[in-house]
Amino acid sequence: DAKTTQPNSMESNEEEPVHLPCNHSTISGTDYIHWYRQLPSQGPEYVIHGLTSNVNNRMASLAIAEDRKSSTLILHRATLRDAAVYYCIPQTNYGGSQGNLIFGKGTKLSVKP
Amino acid sequence: EAGVAQSPRYKIIEKRQSVAFWCNPISGHATLYWYQQILGQGPKLLIQFQNNGVVDDSQLPKDRFSAERLKGVDSTLKIQPAKLEDSAVYLCASSLSSGRPFSYEQYFGPGTRLTVT
């Protein structure tokens, strides 16, 4: 499995941008990078995924380094509702070809009003 | 679109008792997953179904845990007998399909919090 490194925790102020880093130096060239988040007392929810190019959706943006050894999840304007644990999951962390997810400990994001 | 439903939301039992959890996935989703999440850790996959067949149960403690997915829709996860270390949140998730090169987005239910005393 590709090893990932994420900060244990980060803090942000409300309405400011947040950059959540993830190192995945052993990812292979054809594996997607997925991000999920888990709000308190809820199940995880999908945020975004990408392969090589930067990706945007209504929730966030994903910036992928040119060498693909790292990526950054960007929340453009953090809200209190964005306080959650954010998981970076390279596709090699899927069990074989079965599509299951292998979660690390993620980054706990706190948002201050 | 209705999400993944799970019940009960909370359960407290004594060790050596039995417990069962129920999951109803999103309509049309072929793949169903059960995860165990111990406090402070990320979720860990226990078992994966594709329709009503088991795809991966390599991390399911089969001496005490069992799961089934009859008719390829609802699923139940059972623990018999429970141990103290089974205290955790049990999450059910579903997806349209699975497999490379792109694994479909998984949708998670709210989970069942189990406390074993």
Image (cartoon, coloured by chain):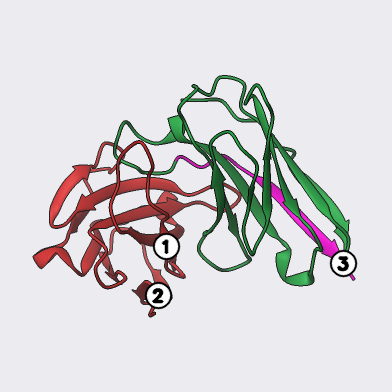
Chain colours: A green, B red
Instruction: List x then y, in percent, for residue A73.
Output: 70, 46
Q: Check disc 3 and report the residue beneath it.
A: A15
Q: Residue furthest left?
A: B71
Q: Which residues are magenta?
A: A102-113
* Same subunit, tags 2 and 3: no
- Image quadrant containing the C terminus of chain B: bottom left
Position of A62 compared to A101: left or right? right
Which amino acid does the dot numbered 3 rest on?
Glu
Output the chain of dot 1. B
Which amino acid does the dot numbered 1 rest on?
Tyr
Q: Check disc 2 and report the residue beneath it.
A: B3
Nearer the observer: mark 1 or 3; the answer is: 3
* Cβ–Cβ under 8 Å for marks 2 and 1: yes
- Image quadrant containing the N terminus of chain B: bottom left
Instruction: List x then y, in percent, for residue A22.
Output: 68, 35
Nearer the observer: mark 2 or 3; the answer is: 3
Q: Residue at x 36, y 36 (%)?
A: B101
Q: Residue at x 56, y 19 (%)?
A: A26
Q: Say the numbered circle drawn on residue B96.
A: none
Q: Check disc 1 and report the residue beneath it.
A: B107
Point out the tag, 2 or 1, that comes first from the N-terminus: 2
Report if residue A98 is visible in the image.
yes
Residue A34 is one of the magenta-drawn residues = no
Which amino acid does the dot numbered 2 rest on?
Gly
* Cβ–Cβ under 8 Å for marks 1 and 3: no
Q: Is residue A56 above or below residue A112?
A: above
The Cα atoms of the two marked residues, 1 and 3, are separated by: 27 Å
Output the chain of dot 3. A
